[in-house]
Image (cartoon, helix red, strand yellow):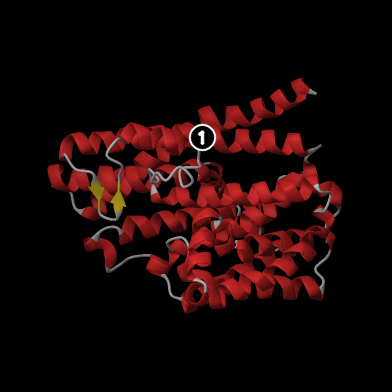
Amino acid sequence: MESPQKINTRIPELDALKGIAVLGVLLTHYTMESKELMAYGFRLGSVGVEFLFILAGFMAMMALEKAENGKDFLIRRAWRTYPAYWASVTLTTLFIGLLMAIEHRHVFQSHLYHDNLLIQFLANLTMLQQYLRVLDIDTDYWTLFVGLLFYGCMYVVYLLGRLRQIELIGTVLLLPVLVYALFAKEQLPFVHKILTYFFPLINHFPLFLAGIVFYKMKYEGATPQRYLLAAVALAIQPLLLDDGGWTWVFASEIDLALMLAAFYGIFILLIQNRLRWIVNPVTLFLGGISYPLYLVHQVIGALVIAPLLVKYAGLSHWVAMFCVSLPCVLVFSWLIHRYIEMKATPYGAALFTSQD
């Protein structure tokens, strides 16, 4: 257990883990989107999304513990989330427009775009496009909506002064989530449809709860009850595999269960301060650009740049994907991180201070 004073200290292992998780997602898209590369596909990298949800639970507790009040939390969260997102949506939309102009089509394999790209772009800027009944510009954006719902719920818990009881609240909520996972789809299809559409957080709640528990274990003690609660939460998650997200396309319930067991072990090592070996300049760089990299890699790299180079320049899929697309999205991600994300976060903190 670490001293509460250390909560204000940045944990480099978290940055490294974020970078590795996003790299896994990227490798899945860059190998599984192409028939030529699919035989060598890194399909289990898709489970990196689940790992990012666990990390989000851990980091939400960290942010709330450091927040001076609810307003501080919301402003800092918004400035960390939206500016880089707006830049990524804009850049992705420009590349979609380029491809549409060249190819005269509106379909990227499984990616169907609105007839009016401007309407889709404007709706996506809100991050609430699902409520507006508009498709995501990039299918990865569904995770941001789930994250937004989670942070909203955590804000409510904070306002009610129940943050100290968050584990108890989470434990109580696991039961209806388990009932939902086992019975709702078959026995209550209408309820299942409504919840999945309007409150998709329910399909990933155990992951966020596990992250919260891991945070508590690190800073308040790794008790047997916490070990058990985190294990139960992660054990429930495979039952929700086909209820939300895209992991089910690439991984089975057994695949997910095994990966979640590995994630459990990784967080135990983090709690015990035995994960320092993953921290190096490469993983820290990937962790630094992980948010914009997650946002721009799929459509721009895998569905625009690489296919155009294969079709019009005659490059192989390997060369187009990893020698051109990957360096391009790394550069785009670094630029967004360096000139938008890094500048927006301090500005948000300064804005909060100036309004006190």
The vertical placement of 326 against 194, above or below, is above
Quarter holding residue 219 = bottom right
Q: Is residue 129 left or right of residue 69?
A: left
Q: Is residue 79 left or right of residue 142?
A: right
Q: Is residue 258 visible?
A: no
Q: Is residue 283 left or right of residue 38?
A: right
Q: Nearer the viewer, residue 295 or 31?
A: 295
Q: Which quadrant is the N terminus positioned in?
A: bottom right
The vertical placement of 211 against 312, above or below, is below
Identify the residue shown where x is 27% and y is 34%: 97
Report x, y in % for residue 157.
76, 51
Q: Mark 1 highlights which residue?
A: 84
Q: Nearer the viewer, residue 171 or 220?
A: 171
Tag 1: amino acid: Ala
Identify the residue shown where x is 68% and y is 33%: 75
The vertical placement of 213 against 150, above or below, is below
Identify the residue shown where x is 66% and y is 46%: 152
**SS type, badge 1:** helix
Q: Residues within 10 Å of mark 1 (few under 14, many from 20)?
A: many
Q: Is residue 316 visible?
A: yes
Q: Nearer the viewer, residue 208 or 343?
A: 208
Report x, y in % for residue 80.
60, 36
Which residue is the extreme one toward the top? 354
Report x, y in % for residue 261.
59, 74
Report x, y in % for residue 41.
33, 65
Quarter holding residue 216 = bottom right
Q: Which quadrant is the C terminus positioned in?
A: top right
Q: Is residue 277 left or right of residue 98?
A: right
Give the mark count: 1
Q: Nearer the viewer, residue 136 or 283?
A: 136
Identify the residue shown where x is 61% and y is 63%: 207
